[in-house]
Image (tube, rainbow, N blue to C red):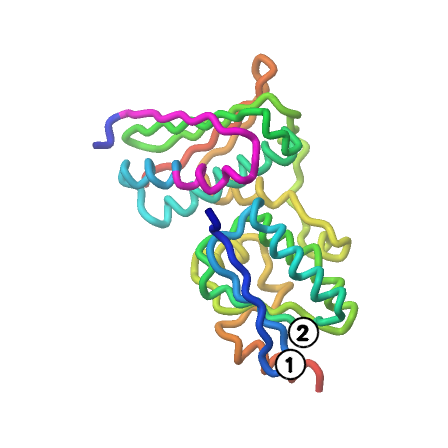
Amino acid sequence: MDKAASYQKSIKASTKNLSDIRKFVSKYAEEHGFTQDQISDIRLAVDEAATNIIKHGYKNDDTQTLTLKLEFDDEKLNVTLTDQGVSFDLKKYKSPDIRQQIEKRKRGGMGIRLMKNLMDDVSYNVQNQKNVLKMSKNRN
Amino acid sequence: MKNFKINHRNKSGFEVLDLQGELDAHTASQLEDVLKSLINKNKSNIIVNFKDLDYIASAGLGVFMAYIEDVRSIGGDIKLTNMNEKVYNVFDLLGFPTLYDIFEDEQHAVAKFLNDSE
């Protein structure tokens, strides 16, 4: 147990598949000894990341595919989500003011805030016309 | 497979929505439809009971963000109750407790509604 291991899953871009994504992540995080609190954090962060790709990157086009990869080692879990949809500029991202959004009857922008809060590291790059989102969660 | 359900009941003049299962970007539209239909009927004293809700993602919180002003503008409110610790944490991380009334149980929500109207 806790030896390096990786798992990959290709998912069609539909929010229908979010519950399967959560099950996939929870199952392997549990098998690799993460605590229930850590698993909750990872599950929500991955759900938020996949939701953003499906809704904003692929505009709910379920013919498109995203790839989810989990890599475990002694220290942490690395999560990588790859897609070929509309890119996102993480540097221009501003955390939303919830009060102002409520007044404008707006929503959104909260997923990234949660990912940054729940995970130890979040990075986003565009490589060879692919969007690559990496997040990691330390064991300790 | 259905992993989310809403039950609507009436409790001494208040609209109570019992949420059950997992509220994510897929299931949030169900909650949105129910809230919209209440608002359209001018039913604005709404209590949402999270007792059987196991999971929430930001799309679920987004529904409350999108409709709270409509509800308040017709003199009502959406009060949230009975969240488990994990679900509450998500609301807390995003700063909702200062903007929404969140209570341990329905009784407290009802009491606040009655107080508000005095």
Which span of residues is magenta-colored?
A4-23
> If the image is split into quadrants, where does the C terminus of chain A sit?
top left
Horizontal arrangement in the rendering, residue A35 relative to residue B57 (left or right): left
The circle drawn on residue A84 is none
Horizontal arrangement in the rendering, residue B31 relative to residue A4 (left or right): right
Percent position (x, y) of residue B53?
A: 47, 59
The residue indicated by pointer 1 is B13
Between B99 and B72, the one lying in front of the other is B72
Asked if the residues shown at circle 2 and circle 1 are in contact, with their CB atoms under 8 angstroms apart, the answer is yes
Q: Is residue B34 above or below residue A46?
A: below
Between A58 and B2, the one lying in front of the other is B2
As measured in the structure, the alpha-carbon distance from the residue carrying label 2 to the one carrying label 1 is 8 Å
Residue that extends furthest to the front in the rendered view of this protein: B1
Instruction: Indicate the secondary structure of the residue bearing disc 1.
Output: loop
Q: Residue at x 27, y 38 (%)?
A: A31
- Disc 1: CA contacts within 10 A as few (<14), some (14-19) or many (>=20): few
Q: Is residue A120 above or below residue B13?
A: above
